[in-house]
Image: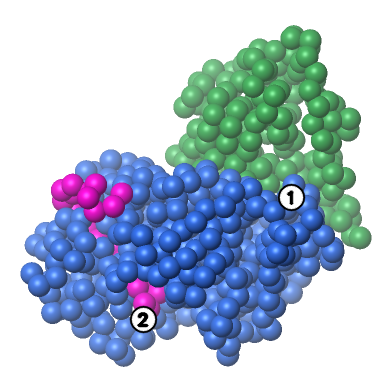
Amino acid sequence: MIAKGTVHKYGDNVDTDVIIPARHLNTQDEKELASHCMEDIDADFIHKVKAGDIMVGEANFGCGSSREHAPIAIKASGISCVIASSFARIFYRNSINIGLAIIECPEAAKEIKDGDIVNVDFDKGIIVNESQNKEYTFPPFPEFIQKIISSNGYLNAIKEGKFND
Amino acid sequence: MGMTMSQKILAAHAGLDNVQPGQLIMANLDMVLGNDITTPVAINEFEKHDFDKVFHKDKISIVLDHFTPNKDIKAATQSKQCRCFAKHQEITNFYDVGQMGVEHSLLPEKGIVTCGDLVIGADSHTCTYGALGAFSTGVGSTDMAAGMATGRAWFKVPSAIKFNITGKLNKDISGKDVILHIISKIGVDGALYRSMEFVGDGIKNLSMDDRFCIANMAIEAGAKNGIFPVDEQTLAYVEGRGQRTPTIFEADADAIYDEVYDIDLSTIEHTVAFPHLPENGKTPSEWGDIAIDQVYIGSCTNGRYSDMEAAATILKGRHIAEGIRCIVIPATQQIYKDCIKNGLVDIFIDAGCIFSTPTCGPCLGGHMGILAEGERCVGTSNRNFVGRMGHPKSEVYLASPQVAAASAIAGKLATPESVKGE
Ligand code: SF4
């Protein structure tokens, strides 16, 4: 699996309230959630994001509540993968579960800048920053996380019999 | 390489001899929990993916505790969805109004969780059962749906921080002061991804209720779980309650910990977390004059019988200050009954408090005690985020039941010592 796109860069402690403010939690409609994604820190985000783009944050990305609406909103906005130095625990697993690719790579998260063009090879575990001509490695996802992401979510993967062993 | 207690429980449930921090595993669950807010989302996912049967009707718990007795039509609709699902799936551990209590007090009380269990719950305070020597952690609704369908969940094996507990608590100091002290020391992300493992000589001096309270707030330090070793007190607690046999796990002598902290219980003072983070713990000399409007004694952190008793001891024969509302909510029906039987309810009502049926209610700003703009509450709950109990400009001070009761009498943040003999 390969992802390639323009980077939308944020800092430390991007919390779930910033990703999708609580006032919009009265819906489970993905498109509607996406239309409010990041609006409190980056009102432009939803207008400039293109399908396949990559979001990069620094420490403790996704901290706060356990709402699944947060990764759902990011994914539905078109983002193909999130790279950060570290993730809050429940956000991390919720992202994997709904099929949003998520990579912990402190060096890449620090050096990648807003607007860079980045290419991620999930099978090889390589992030290439084409704009800065830099390469980073991350341990490839274990097989079963790859199964979840390629099935577009945990429940789909279960349904497809990928965890029958 | 030796394993921590948490790692050992995970390895055993994954059918592995050994696990390493960072490893991703698939493990068998002993219990899957949800409440009236998170279960409906999980049911939608369960049904959307055409699962028709839950994996085990006795290994799922659904507790309607957050907005119950239903506070409005939307809440009633959510409860109804849970009720229909539970009936259709013949779920044994379904707790509706009349039997329910705050989930994290109810499950241990009923023996639904026991030592050595692996538990997930679509509620972040599921970490409470670590007090029993279980590995239990909060997850999202998709995990709950998958857990109900397959009886399994995936985990990233955590590393651990060790807290070496020694000494004995002073009078009127409780588990709440201990955990608020620890969180103010390590911060709200101090244990991110990791287990908090409590060990040492001083553990025997902590009651089970103290341990539940401490494990409950592990999530407030970002931890995946908090866990206590199983000792005689734990076994005495689970005896006669358990639906299953307890299993004792112990950390290996050569287990590796990221960090070690020494906590001497005899040095812990009354600790109150000021707005708006649980890490803002302050001891009495730093409190200053904090006038308050409301006191809330209850929640999955401090709604157990010993909490009720501690508050009643301070309130007995006294009256709360004029202009203060004091809301006392026992966490379960059993605690409610014990409070009636032992005369605690009379003490509360004579002191000018209200005493209500079990519910999460005010803890999450749901109902039964919402704060207006500019109001201040001393609460025995676990979160004091902006707007947690009502208006975004209200304030919550997290405290022990002893400090909460004393504050109700004084009309301001106060220690039990300061109101004695008044
Ligand atoms: S009492 Fe509060 S923290 Fe505990 S489960 Fe209920 S809402 Fe959550």
Q: Is residue A46 visible?
A: yes
Residue for badge 1: B21
In percent of width and height, residue B322 lies at 9, 62
Placement of the N terminus of chain A among the 4 image quadrants: top right
The answer to whether A95 appears left or right of B76 in the picture is right
In percent of width and height, residue A147 lies at 85, 45
Q: Chain drawn blue, letter?
A: B
Q: Quadrant of residue B199?
A: bottom right
In percent of width and height, residue B303 lies at 38, 70
Pointer 1 local density, CA inside 10 Å: few below 14, some 14–19, many at least 20: some
Q: Colour of chain A?
A: green
Question: What amino acid type is highlighted by mark number 1?
Answer: Pro
The answer to whether B97 appears left or right of B229 in the picture is left
Mark closer to the observer (2, 1): 1
The answer to whether B16 appears left or right of B73 in the picture is right
Placement of the C terminus of chain A among the 4 image quadrants: bottom right
Disc number placed over residue B336 in the picture, else none: 2
Q: Nearer the viewer, residue B308 or B110?
A: B308
Question: What amino acid type is highlighted by mark number 2?
Answer: Tyr
Residue B18 part of the magenta segment: no
Q: Is residue A155 visible?
A: no
Lower sequence index among marks 2 and 1: 1
Q: Which residues are magenta?
A: B282-307
At x 25%, y 77%, the residue is B312
Q: CA distance from mark 2 to mark 1?
A: 42 Å
